[in-house]
């Protein structure tokens, strides 16, 4: 996608958050984590109810070893998708990396009783 076309699509309106999320996913697949994180942050700013964007932000942040940022995004995600085991697992892993063991164990229990999302 050309830069001009992408800029036009991003300026188009209500679907901005989804376009930012898609751009973030493309950057993530290329291994450009910092740029992907920036796109996911913009996606959740534009659409705070976008659970997938919160998950993507959390996952990319965890992969970039930004565990505090990841934990915060996973908390937002699990509030929006409380039945998804993947969110609790990611939150538990982030909390474990932050040496918050008791909280990590609690979130691991949530993951054990919740089905995966199938995103």
Image (cartoon, rainbow, N blue to C red):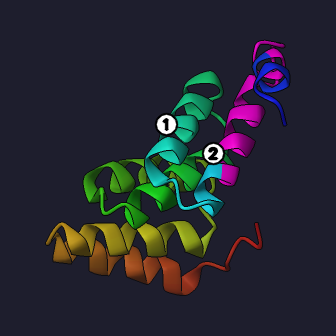
- Is residue 44 covered in magenta? no
Task: For mark 1, give the secondary structure.
Answer: helix
Q: Which residue is drawn at 18% across and 66% down?
A: 98
Dot 1: few (<14), some (14–19), or many (≥20) neighbours within 10 Å? some
Report which residue position mark 2 lands on. 24
Q: Which residue is drawn at 81% across and 18% down?
A: 14
The magenta-colored residue range is: 8-26
Depth check: 38 or 44 in front?
A: 38
Relative to residue 21, is residue 42 drawn left or right? Answer: left
Residues at marks 1 and 2 touching, judged by CB atoms closer than 8 Å: yes
Q: Where is residue 30 in the image (x, y as percent from the top left)?
A: 62, 60
Dot 2: few (<14), some (14–19), or many (≥20) neighbours within 10 Å? many
Depth check: 11 or 85 in front?
A: 11
Relative to residue 24, is residue 19 drawn left or right? Answer: right
Q: Quadrant of the C terminus?
A: bottom right
Q: In this view, does 69 lie above or below 99?
A: above
Q: In the rendered structure, which disc, 1 or 2, sits on the residue that comes first in sequence? A: 2
Q: Is residue 93 above or below residue 19?
A: below
Q: Quadrant of the N terminus?
A: top right
Viewer can see residue 48: no
Task: For mark 2, give the secondary structure.
Answer: helix
CA–CA distance in space, label 1 to label 2: 8 Å
Depth check: 31 or 67 in front?
A: 31
Viewer can see residue 106: yes
Q: Which residue is drawn at 23% across and 72% down?
A: 97
> Which of the labelled discs sits on residue 38, or is there none?
1
Q: Is residue 42 above or below residue 63?
A: above
């Amino acid at each position: 996608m050309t830069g001009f076309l992408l800029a036009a699509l991003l300026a188009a309106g209500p679907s901005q958050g989804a376009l930012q999320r898609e751009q973030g996913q493309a950057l993530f697949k290329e291994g450009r984590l910092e740029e992907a994180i920036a796109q996911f942050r913009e996606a959740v700013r534009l659409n705070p109810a976008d659970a997938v964007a919160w998950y993507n932000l959390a996952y990319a942040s965890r992969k970039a070893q930004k565990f505090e940022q990841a934990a915060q995004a996973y908390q937002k995600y699990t509030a929006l998708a409380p039945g998804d085991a993947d969110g609790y697992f990611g939150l538990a892993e982030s909390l474990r990396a932050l040496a918050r063991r008791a909280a990590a164990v609690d979130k691991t229990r949530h993951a054990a009783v919740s089905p995966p999302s199938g995103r």
